[in-house]
Structure formats: C-alpha cells, structure tokens
Amino acid sequence: MSTTAATVPGDASHVADEIVARLERLPFSRFHLHLASILGVGTFFDAFDSLTIASALPVIFGTLHIGFVNAGLVVSAGFFGALVGAIIIGFLSELYGRKFAFLFSLLLFGLATAAVPFSWNLRSMLVLRVLQGLGIGGEVPIAAAMLNEFVRGRNRGRVGGLYQSLFAWGTILTPTLSLLFFAAFGLQLGWKVLFWFGGVPVLAAVYGLFRLPESPRWLADKGRTTEANQVVASIEAHYDPTDLEAPEVHFQADVKPTRFGELFAGGYWRRTVLIWTQFFTYSVVSNTLGGWLPTVYTRVGHVSTQFALVLTIIGGIVGVTVGAYGFAFFSDRIGRKPLFVLGFALIILGGLAGILMVSLLHAASWPILFSAGVIMLLGTGFNSNGVYLYTAELFPTRMRAWATSTGHGASRLAGVIGPILLGILLASKFGIGGLYAMFLIAAIIGLMVMLALGIETKQQVLEEISA
C-alpha cells in the first residue's frame, strides 16, 4: 500500500479535510453520471446474474433431473459464494482500493456466469455457481460505498436511491429477457443464452480499468493526498469555476488506520447489529422470492413457465416503481428510517395476507401467491434500495466498504438459508403457509431492531454521521 511521502500526518489530515469540503460543494454533474454508469453496469448485472438461475431453474429441473431439495442447493450455492465473496472482497477494498475490488468482482462474476451453461452435472453447476457468487457478493457493496464517497450529502438519498434502482431493474429484466430468449431459441438453448448474456460485465471491467477513478476519500484516508487532489481536480474541471462555492471545512476527514474489528467497538457495534439484522431479515424475503418465484408459480400455482415469468415481471415492476423510486424521492425529505419501517410493515402485511388466504381457501392458487408476493416485494423494495446507502452513511471511510460488505454478506447468508428452507417447507406438510410464516417472522424481527436502533441520516455529510 503506497502513501504520499511528501505529507506528514498533520498535513495529510488537513488536506483530507479540504478534499471533503471540495467534494461536498459539487452538485451532480456529467462526471457523476459517468461514474454511476460504470458502477451501474456492475450493479444491474449483479442482480441480473443473481436471478438468471430463477428463470432457468424450471428448465434445469428436467435437464439435470433434480428435485426441490437439490434445486434449493443450486440457488443457495450462488448465495454461499456471495457470502464468502462479500467478506473477502470487502476486506481487499479497504487494503487496495475501491477500484481494484470493484473491477475484480466484475471480471470474476462475468466470466463465471458465462461458464454456467457448460455445466455437465449437478456438482459442476454448484461449483460454477459458487464462483459466480464470489464476484457477485463483492460488487454491490463496493459500488455503493464508492458512489456515496463522491456524492454530497444534501441529495445523496435521491442520487443513491435512483442509482440503486438499477439493481431492481436487473431483477425485472431478467425474466423479461428470459421470455425473449426462450421464445427466440427455445427452452433448452434459451437458458444458456441468458447466462452467456450475463457475461457482459467482463467488457465493463475492461472499460473501467481505464476510465474509473479511485475514491478520493479512500485515497486521503490512506495518506495518498496527491492522488486524491488530482481526482478531485479532474472532477472540478467539469464545472465553471465561477459557479462553485468556496470550499469551507466543517468536518474532519477520516484518516485513521483501518481496524476490521472496529465494527464491534465503541458505538459502532450497535450500528453493526442494526445493518446486519436489516440486511438479513429483508433478504430472507427478497432473495427467496427472487430466486424461487417462477418455480413456485409453476410448481405450486400450476401455471406455465411463460406465465410464471410474466407474473414475476409484473411484481418486479410494482416493486421498483413504488418501493425503489419511493425511497429515492422521499428519503431526503421524510428520512431513511420511516421508509425502512414502512417496508418491514408491508412485508408483515403480505405474510399475514398469504397465511390467511391459504388457511381460509385451503388452496395456493396463483392469484393468492401473486397478491401476497407483490405486497412483500413492495416492502423489500424500500429496504433493498436504501440499505446500501444507509450502511455507507453509518460508517467512516476507513471501514465503509468493509461494513457494507459484511452487511451484504448477511444478505447472502439469508440467500443461502432462505431457498433451502423454502424447498424443505414446500416438500413438507407446512407447504406454502410455512413459507409465509417464515417471511412474517423475519419481518417482525427486522422491524423491532429498526425501531430500537435505527438513526436518521438524511442530508448529512458522511463525516458528520460516522464520527
């Protein structure tokens, strides 16, 4: 890890303070749009590549001759890889930079996704799914931390929320493109083309190698103030100097060394409990629904694969337009915490509705599955679109990506556990009612922890919140 030898610690701290002040005066510009576009390719395909297995699973059932339990392993293998990847790549991002970690993640999951169709049996598919998950687990938290380190506090909620909606659109366009590929190539070839298309992040990684800047906040944190100044100066070149306010230092930058165990020290342990719980509980719902909805519609609701994908698309669009964009447009006005509370409340409502309808009607028809699913997707939309922004706000630069990655790891852990439990529940006497009960319990826990430990962060400078 290199540092700028020309600065002494006091000088480095003062320069870092000025870098924060200069960044906080910059409104959203073409530079930020270009940055978000590069990062957004990764975030979009992170979701897309995570959920290709959901669209392909009904076909893979017959191709590899597997049942519910083994299908659950196929889905969970990717989440297990993502859990490991989030921890490892998050660790690397604090040591070697956001840019390195982000590009490495893109390259890894792009190559692994394109290789999945070459699986010749269940074991080979599980191995490739784990490798795919390693890269997927690292990308989203690193990209979220990196974007937040460039955007000023007064509109970070809107910018971050709109950016994170790319992940939601990835979840929607996965079944949409699945329908197109299945129609054009047939089921047996179409699912393979879907995975090959998921290899696009490899091209984005090559482009980003030359055009993606390193985070100036991270550079300043590591004492590399000359490089940090160069990055900020290149951003300021996009503006007319007469339009910019003079930078005023109000907050001290984070220039302390990274201690990975600090997540559990001082006042940060409460924030760690908060974000780990939030990530895990909403993800038990979103990851399980996202990975299994088309299969649940076909196997439990007894509809065709094509109609199951249509239902999945409609539910995803509702989740994006109301949940994701609702968070983007209201988080800087009414705050992060009220929207998270609303999200968990909607999941509880959807879980209760599903249990009551199945109990009263004694049948799990597709309208029941769809109605309960849409309500819960609305709730997960508020949480999934805001939790990465929220985590990046709660922790200082020295452990921002690390904290976000560990939270993302909790989400991936939920992705390992949820689909396996779903397969077991569907094959047991509890059936679909047991699934709704699992979602209900998870949301109640998430709501209670958010009410008890959640803090408000709207329109504040990162260094103000994380001090």
Image (cartoon, helix red, strand yellow):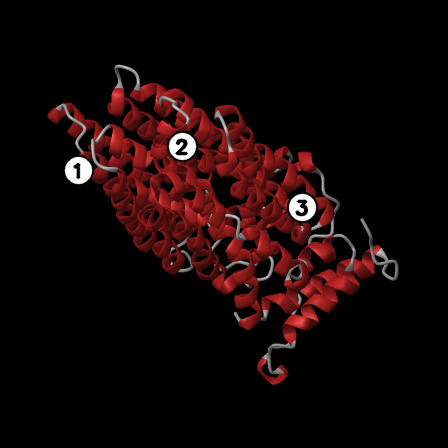
| Residue 131 figure quarter | top right
Q: Nearer the viewer, residue 452 or 320?
A: 320
Q: Nearer the viewer, residue 30 or 150?
A: 30
Q: Nearer the viewer, residue 466 or 193?
A: 193
Find out whether the residues at labels 3 and 1 contact each other: C-beta distance under 8 Å.
no
Whether residue 251 sits left or right of residue 67 in the image: it is right
> Please, what is the three-letter code of the amino acid marked with disc 3?
Ser
| Numbered disc 3: secondary structure | helix
Whether residue 122 sits left or right of residue 106 in the image: it is left
- The residue where tag 1 is placed is 367
Q: CA distance from mark 3 to mark 1?
A: 45 Å
Q: CA distance from mark 2 to mark 1?
A: 22 Å
Mark 1 crowd level (few <14, some 14–19, many ≥20, 10 Å Cα)? few
> Please, what is the three-letter code of the amino acid marked with disc 2?
Val
Residue 272 visible within the image: no
Q: Earlier in the sequence, mark 3 or mark 1?
A: 3
The percent coordinates of residue 232 (x first, y second) are 68, 68
Q: CA distance from mark 3 to mark 2?
A: 26 Å
Q: Residue at x 38, y 23 (%)?
A: 65
- The residue where tag 2 is placed is 284
Mark 3 crowd level (few <14, some 14–19, many ≥20, 10 Å Cα)? many
- The residue where tag 3 is placed is 93
Q: Residue at x 36, y 40 (%)?
A: 55
The percent coordinates of residue 270 (x first, y second) are 54, 36
